[in-house]
Amino acid sequence: MKNTPFTEKHIALGAKMAEFAGYNMPISYSGINDEHFAVRNNAGVFDVSHMGEFILKGDKALDLIQRVTSNDATKLLNGQAQYSCFPNDEGGIVDDLLVYCIEQNQQYMLVVNASNIDKDWNWVAAHNTENVEMHNISDKTCLLAIQGPNACKILEPLTSTDLQSLKYYTFEKGTFAGVENVIISATGYTGAGGVEIYFEDKDDNADKIWNAIFEAGKTNGIKPAGLGARDTLRLEMGYCLYGNDIDDTTSPLEAGLGWITKLKKATPFTSQEKFVAQKENGITKKLVGFEMQERGIPRHDYKIVDANGNEIGKVTSGTQAPSLNKAIGLGYVTVDNASLDSEIFISIRDKNVKATVVKIPFE
C-alpha cells in the first residue's frame, strides 16, 4: 500500500485510515459529519495526493487530447481548466478527468482518478501516434484541496495570488507558503468553493505547505477532512464518482454529461459516432438523483423498482446527506421513470422503500 507525503500527519492526527486506490488514506478524523459541516460552512483540507497527473507537451499535444477526450480543449486559454472524460471504443467511459491548459497548443496537464492512473496512461499512450511528449508526474506531485466558503480568505496571507478573484475553473502558477511553482486552481469536488493546489514532492514542500495552511487557519477553525466527507459533499452536489456512477459501461449521455460531450467537435474523438447515434435515437437509461420518502439509506447496487416491483435500475451512490438531513442517492433508471417527481422504490433488505426523482444538486 502506498503512502502520500502526508500519511504520517494523518496518523498523528488520529485519522481513521483505510486502503483506497492502493493508497493508505484518511477516511475521517473528527467524524464524517463534523468534517462535512466544516467544509460546507467554513473550510477543510483534503489530502488528494493519490490522484494522477500527466503532462502532455508539444505541437501535437492538443490534437491528442482532442482525440481521446469528449470535451473541446481548443476552447482553453492559458490558465483555464475543463472537466472532460475519456470515452472508450464501446461508448463507455475510461475515466473522467480535468484538463489544464498550461501553455495553449503546447503544454497541458491531465488530472485523473487515482484508481485509473495506469489504465488512463496506457489509454492515452495507445492513442499517441504523433510522438507527443508525455510525462507521468503522479508519484512526485502533491495535491491538497482546501475547500469551503472561507478557504480563500484563510489562505490569502500565504500567497500573492488573488484567490478571491480567481474565477471558477481557472488557475495560476505562483508562490504559496514560500514554495515556488505551485498551481493554485479554483476547482474542487465539494461544491463549497475554495482551491486545489498542486506542487512537487521535494525538499520539505509537503511539511511547509501543510503546516502553513493549518497555522493560517488555526484561529478560523480550519479542519482536516477525509474521504468520507469528500464523498458526502460530492454526492449532495450530484457529482459523479468513477466506479460508482460512471464506468466503462455507461455513456456520458446516460450519465447526464452531455454538456462535456461535444458531438460537433471538428477533431473526431473516440465513440463520437456512437454518441451522435444515441443523441438521435435516444437513450434507454438515465442517471437521476432521488430522495427517500420513507426511512432507509440507499446503497450502491441496491435495486430500483417501480410501483409493481418490476426492476427498472440500480442505485450507484447513496447516503444520509448531512447538510440536508435526508437520505439521497444517484442511480440509473429507465427513461420512462426518469422524469422529475417520478415515484420509484429502492429495494432495501427485501423491502421496497419509496423515493422520488429530484433535480440535482440536491436541496
Image: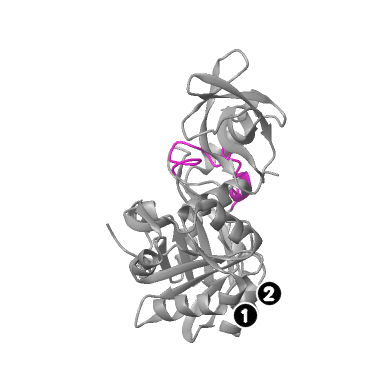
- Magenta stretch in the rendered image: 243-265
Is 71 located above or below residue 151 in the figure? Answer: above
The numbered disc on residue 340 is: none
Q: Is residue 99 visible?
A: yes
Q: Earlier in the sequence, mark 1 or mark 2?
A: 1
Query: Percent x, y for residue 202?
Result: 35, 79
The mark lying in front, picked from 1 and 2, is 1
Mark 2 packing: few (<14 Cα in 10 Å), some, or many (20+)? some
Q: Split into 4 quadrants, where in the image is the C terminus?
A: top right
Q: Are marks 1 and 2 in contact (CB under 8 Å)?
A: yes
Amino acid type, label 2: Gln
Query: Percent x, y for residue 141?
Result: 39, 70
Is 275 located above or below residue 323 in the figure? Answer: above
Image side of residue 182 versus residue 154, left or right: left
| Residue indicated by mark 2 | 164
Q: Is residue 230 magenta?
A: no
Magenta stretch: helix, strand or loop mostly: loop
Image side of residue 142 versus residue 147, left or right: left
Residue name at image x 49 percent, y 34 percent: 299
When asked about the image quadrant of residue 338, the answer is top right
Residue name at image x 36 percent, y 64 percent: 11
Query: Count the marks: how many?
Result: 2
Amino acid type, label 1: Glu
Q: Is residue 127 visible?
A: no
**Cα distance in 3D space between marks 1 and 2:** 8 Å
Is 29 located above or below residue 320 in the figure? Answer: below
Is 227 located above or below residue 351 in the figure? Answer: below
Q: Say which of 329 and 283 sits in front.
A: 329
Q: Secondary structure at mark 2?
A: helix
Q: Say which of 327 and 198 sits in front.
A: 327
| Residue indicated by mark 1 | 156
